[in-house]
């Protein structure tokens, strides 16, 4: 049954279970099999049955709506040159992007339909901005504060009917607006024909080439290699890292009681275990930057106490949106982040030189101080060892000559011949 699942369905299943959904289909199936063998739960089985039922239903629907042979050989209607907003494929739902706040839908999700034979296809679309959209864009262009940044963006994803789709460009993508090329930032893992650009794929900003008051035509050049894609155009507001951080501080702070209860549950002794845990050490340094935490946070699905810095995590995902926890490598999207109020209290209370603390069984904590004297001792021992090696080297380089007269004469290194005067 797993072999019949598509890549998007496997990714959806892994995302529901909080596992990584990156990689090829073979890797995704291996992760799902490991879950079924080692961590099988009622939630996992229910998700697998649900996806299988949806897949069977869509397959039956396609069979029932299969056209007759007469319809297959009939000539297509050549009249529509462009795909208008009326031809809408409303099934795909694009994933919500934290750094883009959708204000209005300019072009609803519409399919990329092949119009002729061959690999390379070209799909044309017409869009016209409403009066309200024109006003918002003009105000954004004339704004001097820079606090509001509006864009008209083009997004492309798979045309799948199950789950929420991530942005994915088709192979050999090219975008032009009003006959002017738009830059598409993408990279390819291989030069082979039909290879899709590597993820993550960002929304394409088409604002600079748009006519505000006239009808706009944009074209998508894409490679048709058996997969179906959907395009949509949105009016969005670009959200900065600082705005997301402020939003986290307002709405995503875990209460102190919940944080203390989590520590207590971690330290709760198991009656069947012979070893009792009396304390848990947590670092006050970010595991990524190796700097002191400023805004400690973790994802809601993470089971560890260790936190990472929310500010740097947002900046890192703004450059390359992976949204993976740096501690346990689980999927950690922006809307799942939670600020640890207990660790915030610890950071405010302890000194700047403290790098690690230990939570005790009563949810209290104490600073863990590594003896710096040991480090100094090691350094002094190293210096003494170097001195001893230097002295030993000097002694090896010199040779001492004893004479019956009682005088001592030293010579240089062994390479030189000793010069002894006769008295």
Image (cartoon, rainbow, N blue to C red):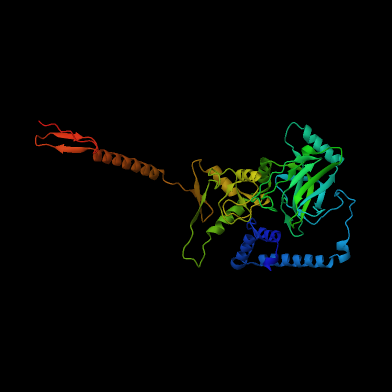
**Foreground pick, 73 / 382:** 73
Question: Which image quadrant for residue 400?
Answer: top left
Placement of the C terminus among the 4 image quadrants: top left
**Can residue 68 be spotted in the picture?**
no
Residue 421 against residue 313 in the figure, above or below: above
Placement of the N terminus among the 4 image quadrants: bottom right
| Residue 348 location (% of width, % of height) | 56, 42
| Residue 39 location (% of width, % of height) | 60, 65
Residue with the most extreme front position: 118
**Can residue 171 be spotted in the picture?**
yes
Along the horizontal axis of the image, is 51 left or right of 310? Answer: right
**Foreground pick, 34 / 376:** 34
How many badges with numbers are in the image? Answer: 0
| Residue 36 location (% of width, % of height) | 62, 67
| Residue 20 location (% of width, % of height) | 63, 56
Along the horizontal axis of the image, is 128 left or right of 378? Answer: right
**Foreground pick, 269 / 107:** 107
Question: Which image quadrant for residue 376?
Answer: top left
Residue 87 against residue 57 in the figure, above or below: above
**Foreground pick, 8 / 332:** 8
Residue 408 against residue 167 in the figure, above or below: above
Along the horizontal axis of the image, is 43 left or right of 159? Answer: left
């Amino acid at each position: 049954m797993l072999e019949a699942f598509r890549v998007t369905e496997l990714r959806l299943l892994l995302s529901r279970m909080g596992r990584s959904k990156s990689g090829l289909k073979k890797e995704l199936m291996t992760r799902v099999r490991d879950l079924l063998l080692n961590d099988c739960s009622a939630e996992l089985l229910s998700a697998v049955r649900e996806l299988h039922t949806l897949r069977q239903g869509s397959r039956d629907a396609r069979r029932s709506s299969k056209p007759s042979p007469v319809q297959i050989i009939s000539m297509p209607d050549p009249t529509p040159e462009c795909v208008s907003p009326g031809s809408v494929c409303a099934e795909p739902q694009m994933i919500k992007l934290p750094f883009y706040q959708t204000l209005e839908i300019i072009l609803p999700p519409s399919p990329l339909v092949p119009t002729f034979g061959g690999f390379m296809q070209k799909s044309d679309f017409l869009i016209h901005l409403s009066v309200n959209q024109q006003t918002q864009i003009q105000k954004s262009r004339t704004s001097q504060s820079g606090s509001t940044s509006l864009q008209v963006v083009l997004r492309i994803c798979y045309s799948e009917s199950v789950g929420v789709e991530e942005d994915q460009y088709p192979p050999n993508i090219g975008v032009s607006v009003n006959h002017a090329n738009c830059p598409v930032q993408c990279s390819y893992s291989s030069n082979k024909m039909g290879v899709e650009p590597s993820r993550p794929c960002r929304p394409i900003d088409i604002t600079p080439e748009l006519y505000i008051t006239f009808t706009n035509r944009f074209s998508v050049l894409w490679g048709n290699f058996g997969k179906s894609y959907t395009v949509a155009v949105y009016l969005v507001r670009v959200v900065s890292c600082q705005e997301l951080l402020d939003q986290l501080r307002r709405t995503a702070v875990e209460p102190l009681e919940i944080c203390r209860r989590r520590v207590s549950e971690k330290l709760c002794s198991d009656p069947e275990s012979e070893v009792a845990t009396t304390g848990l050490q947590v670092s006050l340094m970010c595991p990524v930057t190796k700097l002191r935490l400023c805004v400690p946070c973790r994802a809601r699905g993470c089971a560890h106490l260790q936190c990472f810095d929310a500010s740097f995590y947002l900046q890192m995902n703004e450059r390359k949106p992976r949204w993976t926890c740096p501690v346990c490598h689980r999927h950690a999207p922006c809307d799942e982040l939670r600020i640890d109020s207990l660790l915030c209290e610890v950071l405010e209370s302890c000194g700047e030189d403290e790098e690690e603390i230990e939570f005790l069984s009563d949810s209290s904590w104490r600073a863990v101080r590594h003896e710096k004297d040991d480090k100094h001792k090691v350094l002094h021992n190293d210096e003494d060892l170097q001195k001893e090696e230097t002295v030993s080297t000097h002694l090896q380089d010199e040779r001492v000559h004893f004479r019956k007269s009682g005088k001592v004469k030293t010579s240089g290194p062994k390479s030189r011949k000793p010069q002894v005067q006769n008295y």
